[in-house]
Image (spheres, coloured by chain):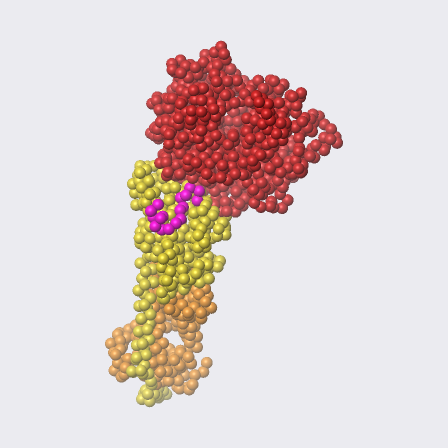
Chain colours: A yellow, B orange, C red
């Protein structure tokens, strides 16, 4: 739950109204995750658990360093380890911090049916407001990155908040604070993009020809961005989507269908009403009764 | 159960209970479903005690409706089998609509319009049920992929809209055709009603000396 | 570390070999990343596994565990052959030109003087030829066949790239790529830093692993310079402090050594400690040994130590053996020769090799006292925890006293980090329950012992009864009092011998170990710490971040031993004229009158370069040693010896397979397995999610790495029918571990002498207490043998077998 003022919401789930727009000069923030500097130490995971007071269960070893194995209501960020052999046959161990990407055009928010359960602040952070969440899981369907997780205990959906509580008071997110190698940076989106450019140049100088910034336009860009050594193949980073965008199915469902459905129902009702006032009820008249009685009587006579 | 003298049984008590259980579920599903479908209608969730309750209760009602509708299918499928008469009836639908049924072919227990509603629902209800299961987060969320769920949710919504429209037609028809409502509340119709709307059905009852609702049942016609 | 963590950023090439810095030192590793980004540095990783460090490396080369000396000797050969050494540096600052004794030699894997019965050397031939004045002979032209550089050249000649690859399994092209990259730092203005840790120490040839790299660094001219050095990344918070304070069986504080029983008198003792210079004009700082020693004796015995009783020399224990290390201690425990054990801040059941032997030893004790903040496995060795610790408690007579101690955050004190910084820390919380500080417990034991002796008397109680104990609260000495005691103070007014003026008042805290006296007028508990707590206050508590050249040296942050010097041997950062080899990153330079710069000179500040004082002032010859003289157990040059358990023959000298100077107890030798039964090479290590056996007690760490596993290459897994996350049984001759398998691409079979050799990785973190899932502990598998010099156990290379399993048998 956020303690930000409602005036900071530039997008609100399940509303047909225009959110407040007066605050039009807030700087957009971004977290930049430089995968080429990440050593997979999980300090970010640890800091996330500490700051947000999350403690998933002690799990099992399940065949990789990914622990817990997946995002959960109490796991908001996760290192994902991928062993990848490059074209030269050399191994690369690609370690990516997974978590909410804070899309500029958030699929979760688009899919959410509960007014105000998902909001986007003027600084770009997408946040879940638990008191409004109804636990339907539509956000999971809306998300192109497979991030939100609905709790089976309290039926609320959870994900990284980008430490909106910390950012509000001028602090960096907990994971950024904890990262020992500076692989996670935080600042204005413009600064982060610029810094990413320098990092990409440096990586290119080290022979990573396809190094690049992952800020996918399909979702309007994201407020969590990656510097990738192989930006041409995001999928090798434990399945980072090539071209993430809100699914056409979700778009259709949350787009065209809504007005068409209401119109269809309204039309049916209107047609019925028109029929009622123009044609009116279809009532049985005396003639019908007479015919019916005739039929019954003749049958009785026949049988008698 | 007793019916007023000289009336014909249109729907047995079991049928009526079954129908109204289905109808009740359907109404609740429409209300709760629409609450989660369109922001303009989210206020409907208040009828269920808020969004969480709406989300929680909707699939359970769906289960009841699914079973209940199966009951209706068992009871009605035979009388809803289509025939050439239905085509002829539909060809005269413009006459039916203006309450002029003189030239319209005689109809048995259900006319083609009713059959369409019946088969429409018989198709939509299971589809809604099974697509609903896939997105029933608490119990079944893990069994299908998110990608599948996106498709099933879309199908669920489209089918729901179809069902709502069919249901609206069905409800209006019951209002429009006087006496129909009583047929499903108190279970009986007058012979005149049967003559006017389901003449073939009446003839069959008469032939079998049956008081309805199916030929052969209740051999006490005219009592 | 010779240098500092921050200084790593000045490196041009970083080699992580014998360690996994990103995994085990993630916070310090930021400086490697800094070097890469800000200095364009290249990172090289040589490791049996593709580690987290390798994941950010520019170049990775696999290596068979226990063959680092072969790799590095090959590197030395490459550097000499391609003439990629920093000539001026090597000529002036190392013993390359010194001439070794004629008797010295090396043949078939053995240096001269080997005694097969005692498995040790008579090292008298491992030295320089001396001239009439007692100075080592030198040939600066390097023409003499027995000058060190030529002997070295001859010694490493066998380590051709083919031979290196044959022994180590490292593909030749990878080996040569590493050589080529490292060789670039032979330029005077380029530096290579070597980051290592237990990956080098935990071998039967551990100390020689490190020496070989140190020789590489000397040849490349990288010792003493910014971004260079030999940087041991310490594995425990304050393990550096432990060695500084001399908490080893043969040590005293400040790297002084305990006497042996052959050194019956103080004079005998001093003969071998107080080195005289081996080259003209050298400092040979250990000349001051007597001052450090007397000041130490005065600090522990006070007035009871005097010139008359030779500063209480007789009260010091005299070793009948080189050392009473832990491997020996458990050997003695097993033989019933040790039957009481005070185990302070240590968990040997998890931490020491051959867990079965440790457990058997503990069972034979009469009493065991554990002092630990955590409920350690050692404290609970007697309790049945199922397959991970089966035990019949009724059959064990050991009485166990578990004394809960507070942890570091619950008391004031100082920790010494890898960079030798003494950093003061402040109490952050009250200890829980009945936990007490180690100091309180130790003081209590001391006072009770003293009372008992007073009441009952006893044989040779002088050493204990005369201990000085001048603390405000004798039951609980304050950490500041102890720190001041370590620092040292004057006992009388000290006067300048030339002017006669009083320079220091009696009772004053000392600023520097240069002020220490051997006449009993000064005390210092640990001479290298002198200066840490002066009249100006607690220097360890300083937090000034100013870094004058932005070169990673902030002299006002905490305090570094010795003398707040941040980079050891920093004289070597400047050329013969006193100008920095790398003008962009000078440390100290000669300004015509004195040495000035951003660090405290490791040299008398007014000793002109022309005086020819060598930069390695602790050595008698003042030079960096390519030839180690008699300081090492197994030879003055490093030589490749196979681990005690190895799948391969020693192709260099089949008759001398393993370290000939290794100390192996008879029953331990029995417990070594053969490659026929245990065909795979195993190695143990830490994961970043855990700190040894501590953090499994912390829920978050338990969540991040919950369960014991081993890492197995895909090829071996396929061969053995092991699928991802299957249960497997890993066995050595000493025991079995049943855990999960991590089938990975990160371990590939290595071609060793034409045969594919598989490596199995065993992380060490799981035991049977704490919040993580129960595990058997990797030390169930490891052999009980140590490095011949230090007795650090060989955890990094041993033999196992592996098979699919159905899980732990309950």
x and y, in percent, of residue C112 in the image: 48, 15
* C803 to the left or right of C485: left
Count of marks overlaid on the render: 0
- Locate residue A199: give its quadrant: top left
Reply yes or no: does residue A184 show up in magenta.
Answer: yes
Residue located 45% across and 19% down the image = C611
Q: Can residue C204 be spotted in the picture? A: yes
Residue located 38% across and 27% down the image = C581
x and y, in percent, of residue B91 in the image: 24, 76
Reply yes or no: does residue C211 show up in magenta.
Answer: no
Q: Can residue C802 be spotted in the picture? A: no
Query: B122 above or below C383?
Result: below
Query: A109 above or below C399?
Result: below
x and y, in percent, of residue C659 in the image: 48, 23
**Front residue of B115 and A56:** A56
Write the start and end of the magenta stretch as one range: A179-195
x and y, in percent, of residue C647 in the image: 44, 28
**Front residue of C473 and C604:** C604
* B31 to the left or right of C706: left
Residue located 75% across and 31% down the image = C455
- In the displayed orientation, state which residue is furthest to the top: C132
- In the displayed orientation, state which residue is furthest to the right: C455
Residue located 52% across and 17% down the image = C276
**Front residue of C531 and C130:** C531
- Locate residue A105: give its quadrant: bottom left
In the rendered image, the quadrant that contains the C terminus of chain C is: top right
Query: C150 above or below C433?
Result: above
- Locate residue A102: give its quadrant: bottom left
């Amino acid at each position: 739950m956020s303690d930000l003022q409602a005036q900071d919401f530039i997008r609100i789930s399940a509303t047909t109204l225009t959110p407040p727009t007066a605050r039009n000069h807030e700087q957009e923030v971004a977290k930049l995750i430089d995968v080429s500097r990440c050593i997979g130490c999980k300090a970010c995971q640890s800091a996330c658990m500490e700051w947000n007071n999350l403690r998933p269960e002690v799990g099992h070893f399940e065949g990789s360093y990914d622990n817990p194995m997946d995002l959960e209501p109490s796991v908001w960020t996760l290192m994902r380890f991928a062993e990848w052999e490059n074209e030269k046959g050399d191994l690369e161990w690609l370690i990516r911090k997974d978590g909410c990407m804070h899309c500029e055009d958030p699929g979760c928010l688009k899919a959410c049916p509960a007014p105000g359960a998902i909001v986007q602040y003027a600084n770009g952070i997408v946040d879940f407001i638990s008191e409004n969440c109804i636990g339907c899981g539509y956000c999971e369907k809306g998300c192109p990155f497979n991030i939100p997780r609905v709790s089976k205990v309290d039926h609320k959906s959870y994900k990284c908040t980008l430490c909106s509580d910390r950012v509000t008071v001028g602090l960096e997110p907990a994971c950024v604070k904890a990262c020992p190698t500076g692989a996670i940076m935080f600042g204005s989106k413009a600064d982060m993009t610029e810094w990413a450019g320098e990092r990409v140049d440096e990586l290119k100088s080290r022979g990573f020809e396809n190094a690049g910034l992952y800020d996918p336009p399909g979702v309007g860009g994201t407020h969590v961005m990656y510097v990738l050594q192989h930006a041409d193949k995001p999928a090798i980073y434990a399945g980072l989507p090539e071209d993430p965008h809100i699914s056409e199915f979700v778009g259709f469902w949350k787009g065209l269908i809504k007005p068409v459905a209401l119109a269809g129902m309204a039309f049916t009702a209107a047609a019925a009403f028109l029929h009622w006032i123009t044609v009116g009820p279809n009532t049985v008249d005396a003639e019908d009764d007479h015919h019916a009685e005739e039929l019954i009587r003749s049958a009785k006579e026949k049988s008698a | 159960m007793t019916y007023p003298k000289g009336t014909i049984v249109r729907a047995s008590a079991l049928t009526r209970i079954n129908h109204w259980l289905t109808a009740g579920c359907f109404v609740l599903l429409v209300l709760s479903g629409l609450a989660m479908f369109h922001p303009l209608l989210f206020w409907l969730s208040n009828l269920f005690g808020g969004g969480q309750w709406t989300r929680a209760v909707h699939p359970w009602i769906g289960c009841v409706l699914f079973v209940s509708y199966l009951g209706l299918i068992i009871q009605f499928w035979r009388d809803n089998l289509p025939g050439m008469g239905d085509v002829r009836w539909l060809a005269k639908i413009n006459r039916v609509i203006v309450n002029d049924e003189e030239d319209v072919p005689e109809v048995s227990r259900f006319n083609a319009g009713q059959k369409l509603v019946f088969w429409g629902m018989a198709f939509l209800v299971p589809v809604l049920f099974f697509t609903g299961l896939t997105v029933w987060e608490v119990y079944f969320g893990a069994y299908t992929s998110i990608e599948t769920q996106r498709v099933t949710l879309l199908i669920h919504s489209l089918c729901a809209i179809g069902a709502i429209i069919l249901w609206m037609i069905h409800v209006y028809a019951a209002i429009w055709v006087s006496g129909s409502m009583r047929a499903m509340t108190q279970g009986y119709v007058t012979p005149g009603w049967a003559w006017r709307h389901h003449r073939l059905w009446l003839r069959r009852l008469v032939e079998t000396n049956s008081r309805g609702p199916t030929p052969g049942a209740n051999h006490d016609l005219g009592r | 570390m010779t240098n500092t963590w921050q200084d790593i950023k000045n490196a041009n090439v970083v080699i992580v070999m014998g360690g996994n810095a990103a995994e085990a030192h993630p916070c310090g590793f930021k400086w490697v990343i800094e070097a890469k980004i800000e200095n364009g540095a290249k990172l090289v990783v040589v490791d049996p596994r593709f580690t987290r460090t390798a994941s950010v490396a520019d170049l990775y080369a696999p290596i068979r565990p226990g063959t680092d000396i072969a790799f590095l000797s090959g590197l030395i050969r490459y550097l000499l052959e391609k003439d990629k050494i920093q000539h001026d540096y090597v000529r002036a600052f190392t013993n390359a030109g010194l001439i070794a004794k004629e008797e010295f030699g090396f043949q078939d894997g053995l240096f001269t003087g080997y005694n097969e019965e005692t498995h040790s050397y008579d090292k008298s031939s491992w030295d320089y030829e001396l001239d009439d004045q007692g100075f080592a002979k030198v040939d600066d032209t390097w023409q003499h066949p027995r000058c060190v550089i030529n002997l070295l050249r001859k010694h490493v000649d066998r380590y051709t790239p083919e031979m290196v690859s044959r022994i180590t399994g490292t593909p030749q092209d990878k080996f040569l790529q590493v050589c080529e990259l490292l060789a670039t730092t032979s330029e005077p203005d380029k530096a290579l830093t070597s980051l290592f840790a237990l990956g080098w120490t935990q071998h039967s040839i551990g100390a020689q692993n490190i020496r070989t790299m140190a020789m590489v660094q000397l040849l490349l001219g990288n010792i003493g310079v910014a971004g260079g050095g030999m940087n041991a990344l310490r594995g425990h918070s304050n393990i550096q402090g432990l060695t500084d304070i001399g908490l080893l069986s043969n040590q005293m504080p400040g790297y002084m050594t305990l006497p042996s029983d052959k050194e019956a008198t103080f004079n005998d003792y001093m003969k071998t400690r107080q080195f005289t210079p081996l080259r003209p004009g050298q400092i040979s700082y250990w000349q001051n040994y007597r001052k450090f020693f007397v000041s130490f004796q005065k600090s522990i015995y006070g007035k009871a130590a005097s010139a008359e009783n030779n500063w209480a020399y007789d009260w010091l224990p005299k070793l009948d053996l080189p050392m009473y290390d832990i491997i020996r201690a458990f050997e003695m425990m097993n033989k019933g020769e040790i039957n009481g054990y005070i185990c302070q801040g240590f968990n040997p059941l998890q931490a020491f090799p051959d867990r079965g032997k440790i457990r058997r030893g503990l069972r034979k004790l009469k009493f065991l006292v554990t002092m630990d903040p955590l409920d350690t496995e050692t404290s609970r060795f007697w309790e049945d925890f199922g397959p991970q610790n089966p035990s019949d408690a009724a059959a064990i007579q050991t009485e166990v006293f578990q004394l809960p101690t507070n942890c570091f955050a619950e008391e004031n004190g100082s920790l010494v980090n890898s960079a030798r910084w003494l950093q003061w820390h402040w109490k952050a919380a009250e200890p829980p329950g009945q936990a007490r500080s180690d100091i309180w417990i130790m003081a209590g034991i001391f006072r009770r012992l003293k009372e008992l002796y007073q009441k009952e008397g006893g044989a040779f109680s002088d050493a204990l009864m005369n201990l000085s104990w001048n603390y405000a609260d004798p039951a609980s000495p304050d950490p500041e009092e102890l720190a001041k005691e370590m620092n040292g103070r004057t006992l009388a007014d000290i006067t300048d011998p030339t002017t006669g003026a009083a320079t220091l008042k009696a009772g004053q805290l000392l600023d520097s170990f240069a002020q220490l006296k051997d006449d009993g007028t000064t005390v210092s508990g640990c001479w290298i710490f002198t200066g840490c707590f002066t009249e100006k206050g607690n220097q360890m508590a300083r937090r000034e971040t100013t870094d004058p050249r932005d070169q990673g040296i902030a002299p006002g942050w905490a305090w570094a031993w010795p003398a707040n010097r941040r980079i050891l041997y920093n004289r070597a950062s400047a050329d013969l004229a006193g100008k920095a080899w790398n003008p962009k990153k000078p440390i100290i330079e000669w300004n015509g009158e004195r040495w000035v710069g951003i660090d405290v000179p490791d040299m008398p500040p007014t000793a002109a370069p022309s005086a020819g004082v060598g930069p390695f002032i602790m050595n008698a010859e003042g030079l960096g040693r390519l030839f180690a003289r008699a300081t090492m157990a197994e030879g003055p040059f490093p030589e490749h010896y196979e681990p005690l358990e190895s799948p391969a023959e020693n192709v260099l000298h089949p008759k001398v397979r393993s370290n000939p100077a290794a100390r192996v107890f008879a029953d331990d030798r029995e417990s070594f397995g053969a490659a026929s039964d245990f065909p795979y090479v195993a190695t143990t290590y830490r994961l970043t999610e855990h700190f040894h056996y501590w953090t499994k007690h912390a829920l978050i760490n338990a969540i991040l790495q919950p369960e014991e596993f081993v890492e197995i290459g895909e090829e071996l897994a396929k061969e053995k029918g092991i699928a991802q996350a299957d249960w497997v049984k890993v066995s050595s001759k000493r025991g079995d571990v049943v855990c999960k398998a991590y089938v990975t691409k990160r371990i590939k079979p290595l071609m060793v002498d034409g045969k594919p050799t598989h490596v199995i990785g065993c992380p060490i973190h799981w035991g049977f207490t704490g919040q993580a899932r129960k595990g058997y502990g990797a030390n169930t598998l490891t052999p009980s043998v140590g490095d011949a010099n230090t007795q650090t156990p060989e955890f990094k290379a041993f033999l196992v077998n592996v098979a699919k399993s159905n899980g732990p048998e309950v």
